[in-house]
Amino acid sequence: MSGDISASGDRSVAAGGDIGWVHTGDRVTALPPEALGPVVCPPGLVNVPRKAAHFVGRGEEGDLLDREAETVVICGLGGVGKSSLAARWALRQAADRNPVWWITAESRADVDAGLAGLAAAMQPALIDVLPQEALRERALQWLSAHDGWLLVLDNVTDPGDVADLLARAGRGRAVVTSRTTDAWYGIGRVLTLPVLPAADAVELFTRVATHAGPRDTTGAEQLCETLGQLPLAVEIAAAYCGRTATPPLDYLAELGRSGGPGSAEEAVARTLRVTLNRLSATVPYASGILRMIGWFAPDRIPALLLPPFPGTREALGELAAHSMVTLHEDGSVSVHRLVQAIARRPPPGGEREWPGVLERARRLAQTAFGHAAPLDSVEPAHWETWRVLVPHVEAYLRHTDPAEDNDALLPVLGAAGAYLSLNGRYEEAADVYVRTLAGCERLFGPDDPATLGLRGALAETLASAGRADEAIEAAAAVVQSMTEVLGADDTNTLKARCCLATAHVKAGLIHRAVALQESVLVDMVRVLGAKDRETLLACSELAGIYRTANRIREAVALGAHAAAELSAVLGEEDLDTLITRINLAGLYAGAGATDRARADYTELLAVCVRLLGDDHPYTVHVRDALDAQGPDDEQGADDAQGPDDEQGADDEQGPQ
């Protein structure tokens, strides 16, 4: 790396040299030793979330998957068993292929997250060190250089989301499931999966219905025919008949009262309604919980999003027994996306009275996010929780109207945007910020401090996403709004001007960034005082900009001034002081003063271990930075004395 540093915003930090970076929001991306060596896939790495308990037929399709060397795209109706076939076949490959990795691929973001998950599974030490973009790239590089692996890309909606992956990682096997039957030319061979033959549908019904003991299956043929022999509908109906000892003919009569034959997917909806109506009499929570989890992503809904009611586990147990959800050992829940889609809409004829029912379920989902999501998403201790929650937040946003976001949900969305930005998922973060901003403007007004703060966060994210013109325009608009609403000398206005300077840095307009940051620093000294925390943090930021502009002596001098004053004002153990000192050590390293950098990192390591612990990202960062300094370099120390030389002594005084 070049040794450039960059930091912006409250408690932000960056360290230069060949040791990695500490980004806005205290995000550390220093590379540990594991990241520097080759990726080694552990043996037996299998991730296949769907396991079909009852699987019949599909022999010809399985044979085709065995024979085919290129990518196979399994297409068909929702509920026809595409994922079940892919999972069944993938598990059979685990003895001969490694890894066998399942990715829910409804969007390009899902694909990227799945690849990042693969890299993290191969190298767990990198989970909270590298951002998702870097993990994704490591996975792609490994796939392109190895064979013997299998990827399952489930429920692809746009072939373009996986085309690049399949073209780049061409040495293993891939199986795709999708409802889309066209646009696959040149990507893979299409296998259109029909509904089950009549005999196989009856066999599936019989297996499920008699799983716990003998049952009357008279009329199973007629019931399966009415259900269009769609596996999902057959399994739901059979699970209910088996669980309650309901004869198929009785279930068929109830099904007939719920509407005509309709399409195969309508058969699932009718089957689901019949089962839920009967369940509601004995398990009141079942219907409400199914409708609530309909707003989340279908796979691995974590236990922390489930209602903390006494009857929740019983209701989930009944839903699982009736083949409407799958329960996992870790307490999470999966549900078929077609079941979710049905749960989110009113039944025919219920358009007038059902909106209230569905609204309560949606609000319950919002409440679940509020209880589960730690709002301090920049805190490393919360990153794993956010990694689990983000797919469900994104699914909720896809399924809902922005006008329905309430004041309890907006802080969760803001924290989700911050987490996505910290992980390098800038486009997704920008989308979340845009939605959150719309809610804040609607509920609180365009001039509310929370609204203005979100506009600043969006501006920084746009800059990080490479959308320089938009970022600068957005940051400038924030400065103007804050100036008009809060006044030119308000602390938030001054900090917004720092954000505008940062946007120019990320846009590559370094000289303009220097001018902007120097100007705001003069005003901070005038308004807040030379020793105010925000003034000194702005000094540290300007030092980083100077380094980017290759004004090394000024960068070191100003960074040393900020660190010394923060130590005096806030104390050595204040986190802002520690961050600024880490930045300064990085400046010394980037300037070639390796002895000074080594001495500072040695002292900082002891402080980080004592204050933060051995495993905190700052501790890891400083330890790796110290290792990167190598043996003593007397010449380097002479070449860049920093603030001890004559020029540095003048510059160290900072703005007065």
Image (cartoon, helix red, strand yellow):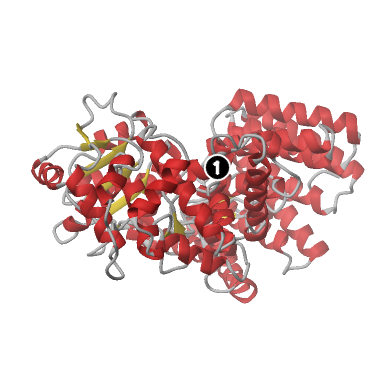
Determine whether 38 is above or below 546 in the image.
below
Q: Pinpoint residue 612: horizontal percent, then vertical percent.
A: 62, 71
Q: Pinpoint residue 204: horizontal percent, then vertical percent.
A: 24, 54
Q: Which residue in the protein does label 1 denote?
A: 344
Q: Is residue 81 visible?
A: no
Determine whether 176 is above or below 100 in the image.
above
Name the foreground residue: 394 vs 522: 394
Image-based side of 4 in relation to 84, left or right: right
- The image quarter containing residue 456 is top right
Q: How many marks?
A: 1
Q: In the rendered view of the protein, which quadrant contains the C terminus? A: top right
Name the foreground residue: 236 vs 555: 236
Q: Amino acid at mark 1?
A: Arg
Alpha-carbon neighbours of circle 1 within 10 Å: few (<14), some, or many (≥20)? many
Name the foreground residue: 47 vs 138: 47
At numbered mark 1, what does the secondary structure look like: helix, strand or loop?
Answer: loop
Q: In the rendered view of the protein, which quadrant contains the N terminus? A: top left
- The image quarter containing residue 442 is top right
Q: Pinpoint residue 344: horizontal percent, then vertical percent.
A: 55, 42
Q: Which residue appears at 78% of the width and 67% of the height?
A: 571
Image-based side of 408 in relation to 84, left or right: right
Determine whether 480 is above or below 290 in the image.
above
Image-based side of 129 in relation to 156, left or right: right
Q: Is residue 382 visible?
A: yes
Q: Pinpoint residue 83: horizontal percent, then vertical percent.
A: 30, 47
- The image quarter containing residue 208 is bottom left
Q: Which residue appears at 19% of the width and 37% of the height?
A: 71
Determine whether 321 is above or below 494 in the image.
below
